[in-house]
Amino acid sequence: MKSPGTPQKVALVTGASHGLGRVVAGFVAKQGYALITMARGEADLAAAARDFAAAGVPVISLPGDVSQARDRHRLLEAAKQSGRVDLLVNNASDLGDSPLPFLEKASRESFLKVFEVNTLAPLALVRDALPLLIRSQGLVVNITSDAAVGGYPGWGVYGASKAALDLVSKTLAAELRDRGVAVVSVDPGDMRTKMHQDAYPGQDISDRPLPDVTLPFWAWLLSQPPMKVSGMRYQAQAPVWEVPA
Amino acid sequence: MKRAELVFERPERVFAHEPPEVRGHARDDVRLLVTRPEGHHHARFGDLSRFLGEADLLVVNESAAIPASLPAEGRLGSILLNLCTRFRSDLWIAEPRWEAGKPGPLPIEPDEELRIGSATVRLLAPYPGIPRLWFALADRPFESMIAERGGPIHYGYTNAWPMDTYQTLFSRVPGSAEMPSAARPITPRIREQLERAGVLIAPVLLHTGVSSLEIDSETVEAQAMYPEPFSVSPETADAVNRAHANGGRVIAVGTTVVRALESAWTPEGLRARGGFTRLFVNPDRGIHAVDGLLTGFHDPVTSHLALLTAFLGIERVRDAYAEAIRAGYLWHEFGDSHLVLPQG
């Protein structure tokens, strides 16, 4: 539902075909944002896009891999057409090898691939979308993980890529503050998603909540003046979401 | 803690149906049950300052109640939409109800629309874990609906009274869906008595949502909570830390104040903090920032009762409530008061 007379906001969400990305994109669409989404699975993304469009907002969905420059280019061309990016959610992530290997066994190739998707691609998207983000005084949300601070056995590759992303987020927040672009990192917490299942193949993860457990956090975050929260790292399932004084 | 432990029976005669001033009494003309390690003591609210002293700090909530109950029309006919938590002017958590005395959950479908006057409100999705609450998005600011059509949220045991009835001596910042009621009997006379006794008073802000949550989950600690905006200022954080350093007690006036202070607690003491909190204060989590509580009497199986249990343990809560029922204390927002001093 959008108020008459205000321009329609635009959200760019990666990894929107299932799990957390799908929940976030759907909720953002319900709040009246036009959506531009990307994910690797073409059929899943098309199904998700039909759900998003039920909110009555324009939806552009592009199958693609955010670690590929040509796919990011297609995403950005679509954003340029709409003339703004109010929200960029860097959600697409790569877990690496499943089952998760100890670091002593992790391959260099897997390490590089995980960093390409989880750390460098989000940064590249911010860089590419920067003129639009500045114009819209937008908010960048980088999805992180408690593995970034945990030191959990097996989570070293993924965790290192998210720890690096956390520092990228915090640094970008400081560097872009003068230009009115806000950056936060968000740890959604444990959830019953495909990625979580891949991390624990064959195990029962049905005690984890579905990703819609994070809806209250997104309702809250998207209601904050972005610059008030820029530079923060949030846990979506934590008891307190702090706004710095 | 098991849900069943928070079940207790109380007769309907303990419900306070109206504020004391309706019957020509003063607001502070209510009873005060004082629970200390040595047992329970029956007093009047006017005796409050006798139980507190120099170096003690009373912390109050500055949030003022707003008329958050909106009459709405929709597929289900005429219903009520009780606003709970404000994210921004057009997005709230809200509770659709059949009527004041008849709760939901209503058979609402996602994206169902309600009309409130000429405004349209869309119920986007249920709140995860609390199916009676919904994310509600409006085509204009809810503030205009509140101003034009809002009434006080109330329930079956009492009427809607004029909004003044729901404000306390400390109400300063509008935003609570329901009155933070613990401070209601603190009149200027009581405040003077407290000040003469050397008791300090400091404010926090927490805009409270719809009534204390009934616990659905078998394990109390697993209950989902909704968020509430709060703020603890540097001055109040200092006052709490000073009171503790000086051997004084920090007494929260109401469960809202406990939630705000505990949300600002760190192992190094209190720090200034603001944002939204869903902190569930229960026996498992414990109490860290507060030494005592001035509150009302709470319903069975609610989050407020779990909070009280965090102060006293379930046995002493049961004992206190048995005594309150036996002695005819009154429950709910216009009822009697309970001063809980777990360490004396």
Image (tube, coloured by chain):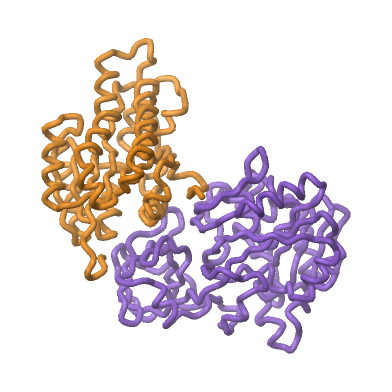
Chain colours: A orange, B purple
Quarter of the rendering containing residue B13? bottom right
Using the image as rendered, state which of residue A84 and residue A17 is in the foreground: A84
Image coordinates of residue B24 in percent, x first then y, are 74, 89
Q: Residue at x 38, y 10 (%)?
A: A104
**Which is more toward the observer, B156 or B188?**
B188
| Residue found at the far top of this picture | A104
Residue placed farthest to the bottom in the image?
B24
Q: Nearer the viewer, residue A40 or B235?
A: B235
Residue A56 shown left or right of residue B131 in the figure: left
User: Does B29 sit above or below residue B47?
Assistant: below
Q: Position of residue B142 (x, y in %)?
A: 39, 72
Q: In the rendering, at what x and y percent does residue B201 appear?
A: 73, 61
Give the left or right position of residue B333, taking residue B190 as reference. Answer: left
Give how far across and how far down residue B205 sits, in percent.
Answer: 59, 61
The answer, for residue A213, to whether it is visible in the render is yes
Q: Is residue B251 above or below residue B99?
A: above
B24 sits left or right of A98 in the view: right
Question: Is A26 above or below relative to B12?
Answer: above
Residue at point 38% right, 62% down?
Answer: B135
Residue occupying the point 68% across, 67% down: B182
